[in-house]
Image (spheres, coloured by chain):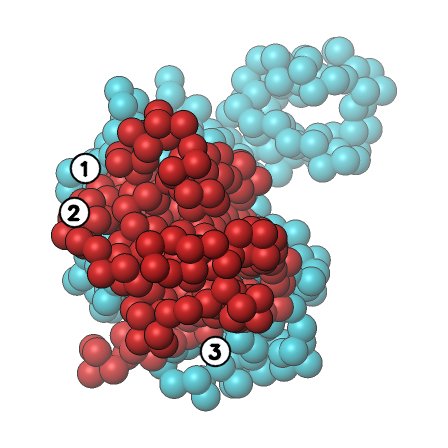
Amino acid sequence: METVLEVRGARHDYGATRALDGVDLDVGAGECVALLGPNGAGKTTLVNQVIGLLPAKAGSVRVRGGDPRVAATRRHLGVVQQSLGFPTTLKVSELVTGAAVRAGRPRAAAGPVMAELDLTDLAGRRAAKLSGGQKQRLQLAMALVGDPLLLVLDEPTAGLDVPARKRFWQILAERRERGTGVLLTTHIIEESSAVADRVVVLDRGRVLAEGTPDELVARLPDRTVIARTALGLERLQALPGVVSLRNDGEHVRLGTRSPEALLRVLLAEDPGLTGLRVEGAGLEEAVAGLIERGAA
Amino acid sequence: MTVHISGKVFGVELADELRGIVREPTALFFSIVMPVAFFALFVSLFGKFSDGGLSSGTTMIATFGAFGVISVVLMNPGIGVAADRERGWLRAKQVSAVPIGVTLAAKVVAALPYAAGVLIAMTATAAVTGALNAPLPALLRVLGVLVVGALPFALLSLAVGFQVGAGAAAAVLNAILIPSAVVSGQWMPLDMMPAFFRDVAQFLPTYHLSELARAQLTGGPVLTHVLVLLGTAIVAAALAAVSYRHARS
C-alpha cells in the first residue's frame, strides 16, 4: 500500500509546553486512520502540521513525499474543518468551482462532485445561508473536488443527523476505494470504531497506542458495567476501579478492570439499581483505559 | 503551466473578492461616498481659489484624492481579512493549494477599481463645479500615482486585519486614517493649519502620497516622496508578513 502521509518524529512546542513529542504516523492510500485522545493530547497540533499550518520543530511531515507547507504539496490534500463560516457573498457553485480551480482541476470537475453530494439543487444558494449539514456537505465537496490523495477530517460529522452521517461515510468509503487516504479526528468514538482501519491514541504529545479498533479493545481486560442508577456522576466517578464514565441519558456506562468489585459497591450504594448488565469494553472504554494507564 | 494555473487561480480569487464587494457594497459605498461628499463640499466652497497657477479644485484632486484612495485601500482589505479570519475562511485558504500571497494580492487589487472610482467621481465633481483646470495627461498621472502609491496603505491594512476582529479593524483603521489625513493637509491646505501640523506631516507617508500626486500637476520634485513611499511599502510589507505569521486564529 502506497503511503500518502508519513510523519516521523514530529515535535512541537508552545513556549515551554511540549505539544508533540516525537510522533510517528503513517496513512496509506485508501486507509482511514482515526486520531483519538483527550483534549490537549496534541491532535490539533499534529493535524495543523499535516495540513501545513504549522512547521514541525523537529522531525518531518510528508504528504506523498512533499512538505505540506509548500502550496504545491497541498494540492494532494483535502481538508474538512469542524466549523467553517463561509463568506456571506459566495454561492455554493462558486465555492466548489473555485476549489476545483485552486486545486488545479478544470471548472467542469465541480458538477459531478456537487451531484455526488446532493448539492446541485443548492448551487445558486449563498453558502452562508445553508443548514449545518448542508455546509458540511459543501466543505466535503470542496475537499473532494481536487481529487486529493489525503483527506484530513476534523470532527467532520459534528452536527449531522444519523442519515446525513451515514451518507457522509458512504461517500468517503467510495473515495477510499479509489485510493484516498483519510486522517480523522473525532470525539464520536463509535464512529472511529466503525470507519477506521487503524486508531492512533495520542496523549500528552506522544503516541500511546496504535492498532485496529479490535486490537486496542483486546489489549485491555476492561469490562463495561451498564446500569440505571440514582447515583450522581461525581459519586460514580469516585467508585473504586472506575476508569471511564459515560452517561447516555438513560444508562450510565462504567469502564472497569474489576467488574465484580464495582458491582458489589454499586449494589450496596444503590439498592434500586436496574437494567444492570456487564459487557466487554468498547473502543471508548479501551481508549480511556489506555490513557489512564499511560498517565499512571 | 505554473504561470497559467497561477493566473487562473488569481482570477478566481479576484472574482470572489469582487463578488463580495458587488453583492455587499455597504462598506465600500460609505468609503467612496464619504470622501466624495466631503470633496464636493470643499470644492464648492474653495475650488475656484487660485493655488500656484492652478485652481484649488484641481489640486484638491491630488490631496483629497489621496484621502479618498487611502480610505478605500486602508479600510477594505484589512476588514475583509479580519472577517475571513474570524469565520475560519482564512484558515481554509491557508490550507488550500493557493499561496496565501495570491489570496491577499487579490484582496488588494479588488479595492483598486473602487479607488479609481473615487478619483473619477472627484474629478467629475470638480469639472461640474467649474473648478478643474488641468490637462487630461496630468490628471491621469495623478490617478496612476495615487492608485500605485496606495499599496503601502493596503499592506498596513492587512497587518491590522491579521491581528484584530473585523469591528476592531474598522475602528483601528479609522483611527489611523482620519488624523493622518487631517495632519497631512488632505482635507485643508497645510498653509491654513498650525505650524506644528506642517512639522509632523513630513513624517507621514499620507502627506508624501498627496504631495507626490500634487507634483504631477505642479511639476514639483518627486524623489523624496517616492523614496518615503518606497520605504513605507517595505516596512508595511514586513509588518504584514510578521502580522500574518503571528495571526490570531
Residue A236, percent from left and from top: 67, 18
Whole-Å distance between the Cαs marked 3 and 2?
A: 47 Å
State the mark number for residue A97: 3
Between marks 3 and 2 in the image, the one whose residue lies nearer the viewer:
2
| Residue B183 visible in this rendered orientation of the protein | yes
Which of A205/B106 is in front?
B106
Q: Secondary structure at mark 3?
A: helix
Q: Are marks 3 and 2 on the same chain?
A: no
Q: Which of A251 and B218 lies nearest the eye of the viewer?
A: B218
Left or right: where A168 falls relative to B93: right
Tell me: B158 left or right of A221. Answer: left
Q: Residue at x 26, y 36 (%)?
A: B202
Which amino acid is tagged 2? Thr
Q: Residue at x 41, y 65 (%)?
A: B112
Mark 1: secondary structure: loop
Q: Which mark is residue A57?
A: 1
Residue type at mark 1: give it. Answer: Lys
Q: Colour of chain A?
A: cyan
Look at 71% across and 17% down and name the residue there: A266
Where residue A196 appears, x then y in whole percent?
A: 45, 56
Q: Position of residue A6 (x, y in %)?
A: 22, 55
Asked if badge 2 and badge 1 are on a common chain, one would say: no
Judge depth for marks 1 and 3 and give the one in front: 3
Quarter placement of the N terminus of chain B: bottom left
Q: Chain of mark 3?
A: A
Q: Colour of chain B?
A: red
Separation (CA) of disc 2 from disc 1: 44 Å
Give the letter of the chain under mark 1: A
Task: Kindly tell me whether residue A198 is visible in this rendering.
Answer: no
Q: Which residue is mark 2?
A: B224
Quadrant in the picture for the C terminus of chain B: top left
